[in-house]
Image: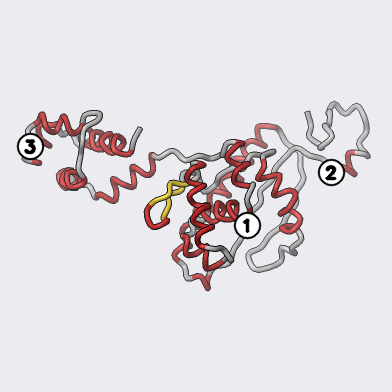
Amino acid sequence: MSSTQSLVALIKAELKSQGRSYAELAQALDLSESSVKRMLAPGGEMPLSRVDEICRVLKLDFAELAGRLAAQAPELRELSLEQERAVVASPVLLLVAICCLSHWALEDMLARYRLAEVDAVAALAQLDRLGVIELRPHNRYKLKVAKTLRWRPQGPVMQFFRERVMADFFAGGFDGEGELLTLVHGEFGAGHARELAERLQRAADDFARQHLLDQRLPVAEKRPYSVVIGLRSWVFEAFRDLERPGLGLTRTPNGRSR
């Protein structure tokens, strides 16, 4: 569904919720009822000035209507294998993609990193072709994926993380202000594991929301943080070697129970 069709659908839904007819709307707009029906029909044309008039009649703020429209826009929570391969193939493209996930403007990217503007703009254009962003005039963009995008567990980006990033990340002491590293082991039912995974996902969502809220803070008051959340059925290799046979569990080479 196009943005125009979605907007029309929202207006029709608001008319219905207020119990107002096409005839009443037509009278308030000083139009014929047939004109209103054509305007709200599939494929009908509705200029922005008319949307403003309808918002006035329905006592709606245009920003509120636009917010509802944005909330309805589907967000990708996972890229295809081909998309991930393309993103990770170029360090510059991967960097710009991560910056876009953090809602950085082009100016922020150029101020932080030694990027040539032409290369950064080319990366934005490629991300647009890949369907990760919608590139807009003046190199602005709209993110078409969720801030909490989930990289494929065995995909190219996570493989890059394991090979090039993980050792660097965990080499830190995790003892700075606001930092934490904890390792907890336990056994519980599969149903409880699913519930815990959902709670951890909500924690990741909270992290993403806080990032967006703090975008307005001055640069000097912000520090970059990263969260890695992992939960899997696993036994440390040295412990697996000490397990007694015949416990009713079969372990795969990577330690997963089955």
Q: Position of residue 152 (x, y in %)?
A: 64, 39
- How many numbered marks does the figure carry? 3
Label 1's element?
A: loop
Q: In the picture provided, is 130 more to the left or to the right than 191?
A: left
Q: Position of residue 54 (x, y in %)?
A: 17, 43
Q: Amino acid at mark 1?
A: Ser
* Distance in Å between CA atoms under marks 1 and 2: 25 Å
Q: Residues within 10 Å of mark 2 (few under 14, many from 20)?
A: few
Q: Amino acid at mark 2?
A: Phe
Residue highlighted by disc 3: 31
Quarter of the picture holding the N terminus: top left
Residue highlighted by disc 2: 236
Mark 3 or mark 2, which has the lower sequence index? 3
Q: Residue at x 59, y 40 (%)?
A: 198
Q: Is 197 placed above or below 142 here? A: above
Q: Amino acid at mark 3?
A: Leu
Q: Label 2 near label 3: C-beta < 8 Å?
A: no
Which label sits in the foreground, 1 or 2? 1
Residue highlighted by disc 1: 226
Mark 1 or mark 2, which has the lower sequence index? 1
Instruction: Name the one closer to the observer, 87 or 254.
Output: 87
Q: Residue at x 77, y 45 (%)?
A: 185
* Distance in Å between CA atoms under marks 3 and 2: 73 Å
Which label sits in the foreground, 3 or 2? 3
Q: Position of residue 162 (x, y in %)?
A: 73, 48
Label 2's element?
A: loop
